[in-house]
Each structure stands twice: as structure tokens, then as C-alpha cells.
Amino acid sequence: MGTTINLGLPDWAELDTVAGRIEPPALWPVGTQPLLAHWMDYARRHGADQIRIYCADRPHLVRDWLEGGAFWSCRVEVIPAPLHRFPPDIEWVDRVPGEKPIEPPADGAGLVRWWFERNMAWLLSRDTHALLLDERHPSGGWVGPRARIHKSANLTPPFWIGADTEVGPAAAVGPGAVIGPRSVIEAKSEIRQSVVLPETIIGRHVGLDHMIVDGNIVIHAERGCRVEIPDTFIVAPTAGRRRRVSWKERLLALALWGPGMLLALGRPEGPVRTVVTPRGHIDLRERLSGPLLARRASWLPHVIAGRLSLAGPLPRPESAFAVLPADAANLLRTIPPGVFSIADVHGCHCLEAEEESTHALFAAARPDSAAMVLKALPRLLWRVPA
């Protein structure tokens, strides 16, 4: 008999009034990866060959994440259940492995502090980690691969600077700085006791203290308040967040176009729908029968032209944006819609499906979401919607 470890995810959805994130808190970034990933690593280090994840808060997003390539070479099962049905031998995913039990947050401000404190706890435990892909910096902190740090930058441990991040002249980083991959810290900025999430620019002369920054969103970890900064010279997302359609997707779409159109011959067509893309409005029409490849074959030339992605959120008309929160709608407008989506992976094949918008926002917020869909593409092509 192998070893089974039960992980329990707290149900704090109603507390997320400040950060306003799409995923449950167990999937929020803590250092190098989501908090749940640290516990998956912990389970494997302790010999688990089966991991059961009990989840009352958005279990479909937890499944999305697990299907996106986060594999631990063992059986993993996500079990939706209310908290009172969790088994007694549960390991709660509410802290970094090795931390002492914590007092759970009571409100939105408390949840933000909880997130900030988990990042600081992770940073202080960096020396004890079994697998390190980053390296010790001579000043005492940790630096990821291909990070570029100007020789005049002032680094004070503890700190962690992620892969492909750039730190400019006379910038001050640390103590207590967690800076995600592919970020830019410009000249003479100061990052102390703060968390900068991946693909974020911190402008010149900007000082952060007890802050969490995600693109143009700044959260004060002590006061529990959030503000969106419109001025890109202060803080902003990097250009990499506006994902372009890759040549790999274009070539794959070209290869699928011919077989798809053959499958589509003779099948009835639905009405024309005008949808929004970052490059303007386009008209799409979907076949009403057959597998997804046949139904959406006429969309593939738009992938070849770079107007649609092969994998991304389902295309939406203007009316579908009106029912979303403003920040969510703005985010989706920057992402090329896809012929196939993470919603398709989970059986939501139209905008009217109950959980489609949640899947769409998950796809927009996760740079690796396209890879999740492309991995599932061989079975998606032949799926026949009910």
C-alpha cells in the first residue's frame, strides 16, 4: 500500500474583497509558484504516491491548474466537498509547509495580509528548500536564471529576484523583497518588504514598502486597500502580458484548416457573430453539428492572420463584455480570443454556459493557459458538444 496525503483548501472566497483575484487563495503566487504547489512538493518529499485535494472553493479552477502541466508523478484527485466533509487527517493549505498553524483571516484586509505574510515566510525558508533552480547572490539573497542586475544596484537580503528580471541602476532591493519573473525594476526605485508579481514594471524613483504589486494594481498589505494606477511610468504590466499569436499556433491552424473544412462540408451554419479582438472586430460563424474541428474550421484563417489564437478565451461580442466587471472585461480585451478554450476542456462550449466566464478569466490571467489547451487539443478536435 502506498501513502495517501489529504490536502484541504480553505474556503475564503467571500473574504476576497480587496485582492479580487480569479483563483482561490491556495493558487495565489507565493514565491516561485502557487501555494498549493509548495504543498504538492511537500507531499511528494514525504513519499506520497496519491494526493487528494479537498476543495470547497472553485474546484474547477484547481483542476484547470493541475491539468496545465503541474505534474508530480503520482495520482492526484480533486474532491469538491463542503468543509464539514473534509477528513480529519487533513493538511491545511493555509501556510507554507513547515510554518506553525496560523490564525485564519477574518476579512478582506486580513486575507491580503495573509498572502503577504506567506510570501515573507517562504522567503525566510528559502535556505531549507530541497530543489533550487536559482542561485545565491554574493550579497546573500537569491537570483533566478538570466536575471540582469546593474552593478550599482543595492541588494539587501533576504530577497528573491525571479528569472529574466531586470534591476536598473541605483535601485534598492530588500530586505524582504520578492520579485517575480520577467519584471523590470527601473533606476533608483526601492523595493522593501514587498511582493512584485511576475511581468510587472516598477518605474523610476518609485518606493514600495509592505506592498503587493500586480501590473498596475497596488495593494497595501498593512492597510488592506487596493488602487489601480493609470500612470504607466509608476507601475504597469510588461508588454509580455498582451500575448501575441505564435507562429507555432499559426502553422498548426494552417495544418488543421483543410481537414476541418472537409469535415464541415454540408453541415448547417449558425448566425454570424461579430466578436472583439485586440486587432478589431471580426465576424465568425460556427457550424451547428459535428466535432469542434468541423464547427470552428472557418475560424482558423483568423489564427493564420494573427487575429485569433488557436488556444485562448472563447470569442465574445461587445454585449458579453457588458455583464463582466470592468477590470475583468478590460483584461479580456487585451487577449486574442481562441478557436479552442480552457472552457472547452471542461465541457463549456458556448458563452451561455454557466462557468464559461470563470474559465475565460482564468485563461486571461494565466500566461500558461494556452499550453493547457494545446496539450488537450488532440481530444478537443474530435469532441462533439452535447
Image (spheres, helix red, strand yellow):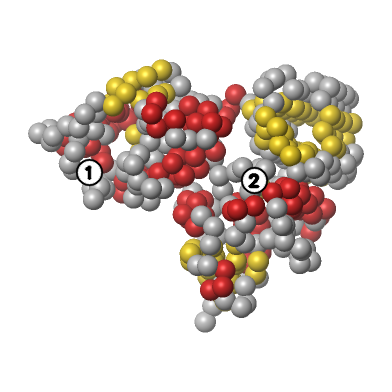
Label 1: state its secondary structure. Answer: loop
Residue at image location 56% in from the left, 32% down from the top: 327
Label 2 – label 1 distance at C-alpha:
41 Å
Picture coordinates of residue 166 (x, y %)? 74, 28
Which of 93/185 is in front? Answer: 93
Observer able to see residue 192: yes
Which of 163/120 is in front? Answer: 120
Q: Amino acid at mark 1?
A: Pro
- Considering only order in the chain, which callout, 1 or 2, is on the residue closer to the N terminus? 2
Residue at image location 70% in from the left, 32% down from the top: 227
Picture coordinates of residue 293 (x, y %)? 25, 38
Q: Amino acid at mark 2?
A: Thr
- Res. 291 mark: 1
Instruction: Please count the marks in the image.
Output: 2
Residue tagged by mark 2? 17
Which of 318/52 is in front? Answer: 318
Picture coordinates of residue 243 (x, y %)? 51, 28
